[in-house]
């Protein structure tokens, strides 16, 4: 089967999938003995902020009619492998991992959203292809992951724009990184750094319910915008593979 025929097959699959509810995996970063970055106050840790926002985000998404699967719903330790396994088992339409930053010098602030670096995404796509039994399945697996990577950037832009607009945070942009949790997930995937826990103003705000609600609303709005985009009729055109490959910036 040619790459174009594969792309058409993928397009048809996504058309069939339109009837199903949009499923989001929400991953609260860290947990249990893996506390993440410390906050300003004694006992304040990243793992608590990520879980609080994850719960609010799940609530908001369900209110909007999305299906939500959380990788963890309480303060529990999860290996990276288990996080990825839980995410993929849910067969999600997208995946969002929540984190908060710390700079060490208490000077930095702002939000940033990460997608998997393009070269890492290509390696993952090839790896997925080698696991398949025949050439057609291998090509479909590779195209599906490359398609998911392109969509990750779209999801990241939507989420980052809503976060900056709704929370008024400093825009540190959409960035690329080789995070393992993003590499393992077979769906559009982003990792959001929701702010700096050790910044005197931003860090204190991140621990308040009001800020956590604002962030959750912004993330839900970004995900809803992404879901609308990928479920619109233009999806068939937008998901066609690039004719040329660009180098990773
Ligand atoms: Zn983190």
Image (cartoon, rainbow, N blue to C red):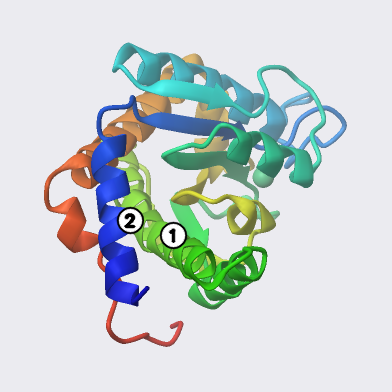
Can residue 161 be seen?
no
- Residue name at image x 40 percent, y 55 percent: 152
Which quadrant of the rendered structure holds the C terminus?
A: bottom left
Which disc is residue 129 wearing? none
Provide residue 147's location: percent of width, then percent of height. Answer: 38, 62
Find out whether the residues at labels 2 and 1 contact each other: C-beta distance under 8 Å.
yes
Residue 236, position as x, y percentages in the image: 19, 56
Q: For the residues marked 2 and 1, what is the alpha-carbon distance in whole angstroms?
A: 8 Å
Q: Could you tell me which secondary element the residue under label 1 belongs to?
A: helix
Q: Write the residue at 37% across / 21% down.
A: 61
Classed neighbour count for the residue bearing mark 1: other residues with Cα under 10 Å, few (<14), some (14–19), many (≥20): many
10 Å crowding of disc 2: few (<14), some (14-19), many (20+): some
249 to the left or right of 47: left
Secondary element at image label 2: helix
Q: Is residue 155 visible?
A: yes
For marks 2 and 1, the one nearer the N-term is 2
Q: Position of residue 180 (x, y in %)?
A: 68, 58
Name which quarter of the figure residue 149 lies in. bottom left
* Ligand 1 occupies quarter: top right
Which residue position holds label 1?
144
Report which residue position mark 2 lands on: 10
Q: Is 195 or 71 nearer to us in this picture? A: 71
* Mark 1 residue CB less than 8 A from any atom of ligand 1: no
């Amino acid at each position: 089967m040619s790459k174009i025929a594969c792309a058409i097959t993928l397009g048809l699959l996504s058309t069939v999938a339109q009837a199903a509810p949009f499923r989001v995996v929400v991953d609260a970063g860290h947990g249990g003995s893996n506390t993440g970055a410390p906050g300003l106050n004694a006992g304040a840790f990243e793992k608590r902020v990520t879980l609080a926002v994850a719960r609010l985000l799940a609530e908001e998404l369900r209110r909007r009619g999305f299906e939500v699967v959380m990788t963890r719903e309480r303060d529990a330790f999860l290996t990276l492998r288990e996080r990825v396994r839980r995410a993929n088992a849910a067969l999600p339409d997208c995946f969002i991992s929540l984190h908060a930053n710390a700079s060490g010098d208490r000077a930095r602030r702002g939000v940033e959203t990460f997608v998997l670096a393009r070269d890492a995404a290509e390696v993952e796509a090839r790896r997925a292809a080698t696991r398949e039994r025949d050439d057609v399945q291998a090509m479909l697996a590779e195209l599906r992951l490359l398609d998911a990577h392109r969509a990750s950037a779209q999801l990241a832009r939507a989420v980052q724009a809503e976060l900056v607009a709704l929370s008024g945070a400093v825009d540190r942009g959409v960035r690329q990184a080789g995070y393992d949790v993003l590499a393992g997930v077979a769906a559009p995937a982003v990792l959001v750094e929701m702010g700096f826990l050790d910044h005197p103003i931003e860090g204190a705000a991140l621990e308040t319910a009001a800020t956590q609600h604002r962030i959750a609303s912004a993330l839900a709005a970004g995900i809803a915008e992404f879901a609308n985009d990928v479920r619109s009729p233009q999806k068939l055109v937008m998901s066609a593979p690039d004719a040329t490959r660009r180098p990773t910036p």
